[in-house]
Amino acid sequence: MKILVTGAAGFIGFHLSKRFLDMGHEVVGLDIVNDYYDPAVKWDRLKIISEYPAFKHAKIDLSDNAAMEELFSKEQFTHVVNLAAQAGVRYSIENPRAYVDSNLVGFANILEGCRHNKVEHLVYASSSSVYGMNTNMPLSTHEAVDHPMSLYAATKKSNEMMAHSYSNLYGLPTTGLRFFTVYGPWGRPDMALFLFTKNILEGKPINVFNHGKMRRDFTYIDDIVEGVVRVTQNTAAPNPEWDGANPDPATSSVPYRIYNIGNNNVVELTRYIEVIEECLGKKAIYNMMPMQPGDVPATEADVTDLQNDVGFRPDTSIEVGIKNFVDWYLDYYGKPE
């Protein structure tokens, strides 16, 4: 396969690109390397995957239509995995236009590139945040998601609808993946695990939202990557049993699929922090805070379809995953003086 991975300098994109390269595929990694968080981490990730002869970095803005057209025309990808997006629920309240440019305009450019260059399969990152106000656990792709609680979630839901329209109009096989709270080595500095680890080591308080009563389906990075790889190789196909009188949101009469990728094991935030404390050998100073706008109190993924269709079910425990992150963090940043 010749694969375009957008967001290749990002947390998931880096790990996925490395995995594809290790499998012997050719990867073009698109990433503008913006400063949403420390670009040094992104450049260090890129440095690692750039050592592979089969990797090429394209420093292009996803919303640059002309540059995207040229890239698709020149490279002729067989597969595209779109991970580039403006991330973060809380930041979408502060800077909504960044989400429109990257997550909507940028995704439209991806769809157009796939359509005009006969890409065999487009796989793209959606998010568990699309479930919004849904409270029926575990969260299922077969239930409608019409009540997003943030603009970030709304853009991800929009991506799913845009993809469906291209699957319908042009027969483009598309698969959307709803990721559930991804964590692990090389994780983003704006995410809870990173912030908690840094502040605990430095003896600073950690902000614990919803007074520690948040419940999350924490999913380890290697499980996310395994799921993405398997789905990419399993080209979306029409569901012959799909019925417009009783429409299934996860499938269609056209080549369109939606999957959850989550650990299917809900953990309370206070337990998550306890494991970090155990790995660091140091107690946290808690700053209990109310629920933040746009956040949801709980997530839990139904991964039945993922298991049935590609034979994979994430199962890495937080005890294993957090230790791996802490080991990486201490190796990368060292212990504070």
Image (tube, rainbow, N blue to C red):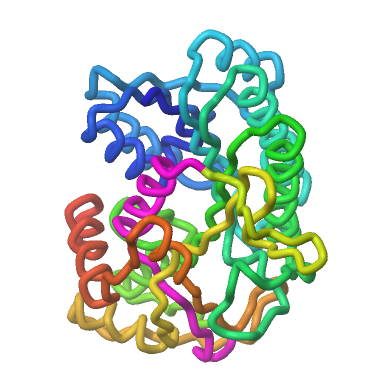
Identify which residue is drawn at 23% across, 34% down.
Answer: 23
Considering depth in this image, is 186 or 140 the residue closer to the camera?
A: 140
Q: Is residue 52 left or right of residue 41?
A: left
Say which quadrant the C terminus sits in.
bottom left
Q: Quadrant of residue 324?
A: bottom left
- Looking at the magenta stretch, what is its main secondary structure? helix
Image location of residue 33, percent across then percent down: 50, 33
Identify which residue is drawn at 77% across, 69% down.
Answer: 246
Image location of residue 93, percent across then percent down: 74, 60
Q: Is residue 216 magenta?
A: yes
Q: Is residue 223 above or below residue 136?
A: above
Image location of residue 162, percent across then percent down: 74, 43
Considering depth in this image, is 158 or 269 the residue closer to the camera?
A: 158
Say which quadrant the N terminus sits in.
top left
Identify which residue is drawn at 55% across, 91% down.
Answer: 211
Considering depth in this image, is 54 or 1 the residue closer to the camera?
A: 1
Q: Which residues are magenta?
A: 210-235
Q: Is residue 189 magenta?
A: no
